[in-house]
Amino acid sequence: MQQTHESALPGFLGMLDSAISRIESFLLAMGVLLMAANTVANVVGRFVLGNSIFFSEELNRILIILITFAGISYAARNARHIRMSAVYDLLPARLRKGMMVVISVVTAAFMFLLCYYAAKYIGSQASRGRVLPALQIPVWVILIWVPAGFFMTGAQYLLTAVRNLTSSGIYLSTHVQEGYEDAEEIEI
């Protein structure tokens, strides 16, 4: 499946949606590739050369934070978050659409609130002056991805609400319409 960064939203909102998509894709791709390269290099160093890379664990910790919080925005963009839809699915289309707008706005507000609290936490970490032992990077720097991820996720849900208000269909994200006809049945 080829990832497209084009948005169905008009004007500035479409540009914002496309920009967030590009940022997510870049961060996720680079994060996973760097983590894989770092892990392989560390294993080779440990078992072939007899020495580990001294900062490998810290770097992977940074990359896990990056991937996690860029990933929540990516999941929101592609409507991949867990949904509790038993009651929602029983509603008529008009109520489902209204409910999707409310769900999107409330979720966006919650994400922006988490962004605010994460930024406050980073401020408290910055005032403590703690640094990572091996890399000597201030701890607060590696946590920047947390509010960034919450902000991008909040923006994604807000854009989903706008998409539902400006389009005739019911959208789970800016480009994913509700429905189960494309879903594969997974056997466990």
Image (cartoon, grey):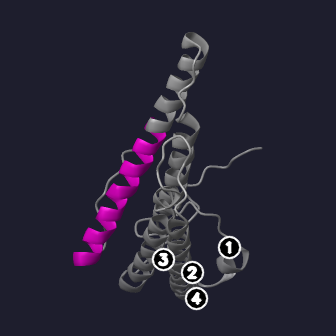
Residue 85 shows which numbered tag?
A: 1
Determine the CA span between mark 1 and mark 4: 13 Å
Residues packed near mark 1 inside 10 Å, few (<14), some (14 to 19) or many (20 plus): few
Look at discs 1 and 4 and give the one toward the viewer: 1
Residues packed near mark 2 inside 10 Å, few (<14), some (14 to 19) or many (20 plus): some
* Residue 66 is one of the magenta-drawn residues: no
Determine the CA span between mark 2 and mark 3: 21 Å
Figure check: 39 above or below 24: above
Residue 163 shows which numbered tag?
A: none
Who is closer to the viewer here, 163 or 15?
Answer: 15
Amino acid beneath label 4: Leu
Amino acid beneath label 3: Ile
The quadrant of the image that shows the C terminus is top right
Amino acid beneath label 1: Ser
The answer to whether any part of residue 178 appears in the image is: no
Q: Is residue 29 left or right of residue 100?
A: left
Q: Which residue carries the number 2 mark?
A: 110
Amino acid beneath label 2: Phe
Give the magenta part as a residue range.
Answer: 10-33
Determine the CA span between mark 4 and mark 2: 22 Å
State the image coordinates of residue 146 (x, y, percent, origin top left).
51, 64
The quadrant of the image that shows the N terminus is top left
In terms of secondary structure, where does tag 1 sit? loop
Please name the residue shown 52% across and 48% down the image. Answer: 62
Return the disc, 3 or 1, that comes first in the chain's sequence: 1
State the image coordinates of residue 154 (x, y, percent, origin top left).
47, 75
Q: Which residue carries the number 4 mark?
A: 95
